[in-house]
Amino acid sequence: MSLIHTMEFVIANAPSIHVVPAVAIPEAYRQYAQGFAQPYLFTSSKIDIMVQRYETSGTSIVNIVFIAHEKSIVETQLKRAFHVCSCMLQGTAEVFVRSMGKVLLYQGQFNLFEVKPEKLLLYFEPGVYEWQGIAFSRKQISDLAELSPMLNKWLPMMDGSKFVAVSKHSGIIREELGSRIRELKKAAVPEKLKGLWMQHKIFEVLMWVVGYFEGEQPSDAGNSEFMLFAGIKSYIDQNLDIPHTIAELAHMYNISESKIKKGFSKYYQIPISKYLVKQRMETAERLVRESGLSMNKIAYMLGYGYPANFTREYKKYHGKLPGATR
């Protein structure tokens, strides 16, 4: 049975508006399609939802993009249990789970959940949201359980009936995990090898996640506010090609501009506006010095639409033109 026949979405705050399968993917939405599975689009006047899922031998990866045109509350019924690493790649969403209450999924953070068949309510302000789920098989978790106290505790949760958080706190999607997610989404392997390749890559993610949570953690790891700003910092560091504004970042993380300014300075002792420039300019200096790339290419990689803007910013920060560095 195809994915389009196994998923259903209802707009809880406007039940008379139906979310229906689209016949084709509009050109504007093709940017959200990934290489690992066929995309399916569900549309309505309030929100559009693109879903991709690939399953093999008890493991799966799921990518869902929500394009909210208006404030929306989406209701969906989970059909079966999953042992999942939940990754919020874009936007910050609020989810209501009956057995857990309100769960905030912040952009740039991941969590481990034992998911049970249950109804979910998802709250969206206008904007684009991307969620990636990486579901492990019971065998994969069992194979590592003797080596991992966290996974050993996860095993009995699988036989329970409650939707629960396995990890004590959220994790930050650093480059090590971010690169693995991008690799899974692209899935640049022959179709006949995809199943085995996916299982191997998903197992890699599981091992990395165990190392993350059971390795040495920052002293503030249990502080949700610290984790929020650590996620913002990590997102900036991994997306220097995007010309971020403070207003856009605040919207992504569902917080005010004043809070993002105060919080970032509190934890990193530098205003976020200066950090945005610092990361671009220090990366620019390294690329100019070491890469051999053209100035136009470097400007593009760092989110500058016009090379002249890049040159002006570089001279202002470093006191010399990019060519003088090379």
Image (cartoon, rainbow, N blue to C red):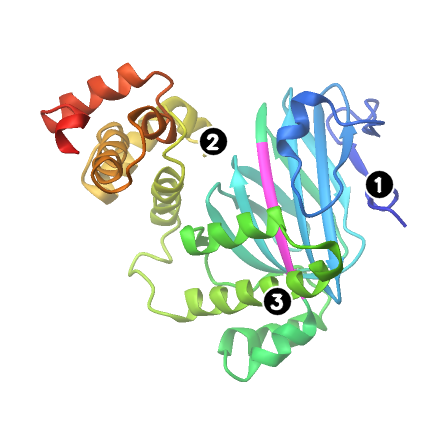
Q: What residue type is labelled 1?
A: Ile
Which numbered disc, 1 or 3, marks the residue closer to the eye? Answer: 3
In the image shown, does 73 or 62 lie closer to the viewer? Answer: 62
Question: Measured from the top left, where is residue 152 in percent x and y?
Answer: 57, 79
Question: In the image, is 26 to the left or to the right of 100?
Answer: right
Farthest-out residue, bottom: 146
Residue 60 falls within the magenta-colored stretch: no
- Secondary structure at numbered mark 3: helix
Q: What element carries label 1?
A: helix
Instruction: Report the span colored magenta.
Output: 129-136
Viewer-side label of 1, 2 = 1
Instruction: Give SS at disc 2.
Output: helix
Cα distance, mark 1 to mark 2? Answer: 28 Å
Q: Which mark is residue 200?
A: 3
For residue 132: magenta? yes
Closest to the observer, 266 or 207: 207
Q: Quadrant of residue 310?
A: top left
Name the amino acid type tagged 2.
Met
**Residue at mark 3 to residue at mark 2: CA–CA distance:** 32 Å
Q: Nearer the viewer, residue 258 or 318?
A: 318
Residue of label 1:
4
Q: Mark 2 points at which residue?
A: 252
